Amino acid sequence: MKKTVWLAVAFVLAVIGLVVATTFSGQRVKVEVCIAFNGRSDCRTVQASTREDALRTATQNVCAQLASGVTESGQCENTPPVSVTWK
């Protein structure tokens, strides 16, 4: 095979290795956040590398379902959760 084919194969393997390593490395925290907003409620579960990231992402995910528009999203994200369950 040509040198360029070997380089392409090596590059693809390196990218796959990097993706696998970053996906499975480090401890992950998992949280379920439930929020009631504007008469509706919803829950979302996420995993992240830190508790802060997990809580923020879960809150944003819930509010994406409950709120309509930027203003409501901001209000929803500032609403205290009904429940936060660390898993």
Image (cartoon, grey):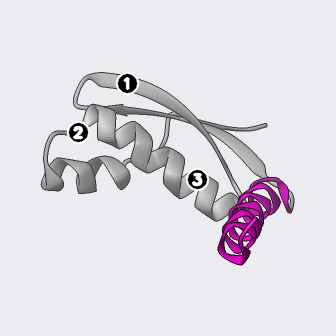
Name the residue nearer the viewer: 32 or 2: 2
Classify 10 Å Cα crowding around label 2: few (below 14), some (14-19), many (20 and above).
some
Classify 10 Å Cα crowding around label 1: few (below 14), some (14-19), many (20 and above).
some
Disc 2 marks which residue? 67
The local secondary structure at tag 2 comes to loop
Q: Earlier in the sequence, mark 2 or mark 3?
A: 3
Q: Give the range drawn in magenta.
A: 1-25
Choose mark 2 or mark 1, whichever is in front.
Answer: 2
Q: Earlier in the sequence, mark 2 or mark 1?
A: 1
Disc 1 marks which residue? 41
Residue 40 in the image, given as x and y percentages of width and height: 29, 23
Q: In which quarter of the image is residue 31?
A: top right
Left or right, 41 with reference to 12 = left
Cα separation, mark 1 vs mark 3, equals: 17 Å
Give me the residue at 82% from left, 53% from top. Answer: 24
Q: Of the residues shown, which amino acid type is indicated by label 3?
A: Leu
Please say whether residue 62 is one of the residues in the magenta stretch: no
Cα separation, mark 2 vs mark 3, equals: 18 Å
Q: In which quarter of the image is residue 18?
A: bottom right
| Vertical order, 9 against 86 (above or below) | below
For the stretch drawn in magenta, what is the main secondary structure?
A: helix
Q: Do the residues labelled 2 and 3 touch (CB within 8 Å)?
A: no
Q: Of the residues shown, which amino acid type is indicated by label 1?
A: Ser
Disc 3 marks which residue? 55
Q: Which quadrant, please, contains the N terminus?
A: bottom right
Classify 10 Å Cα crowding around label 3: few (below 14), some (14-19), many (20 and above).
many
* Residue ranking furthest to the front: 1
Q: Of the residues shown, which amino acid type is indicated by label 2?
A: Ala
Give me the residue at 31% from left, 41% from top. Answer: 64
Q: In which quarter of the image is residue 6?
A: bottom right
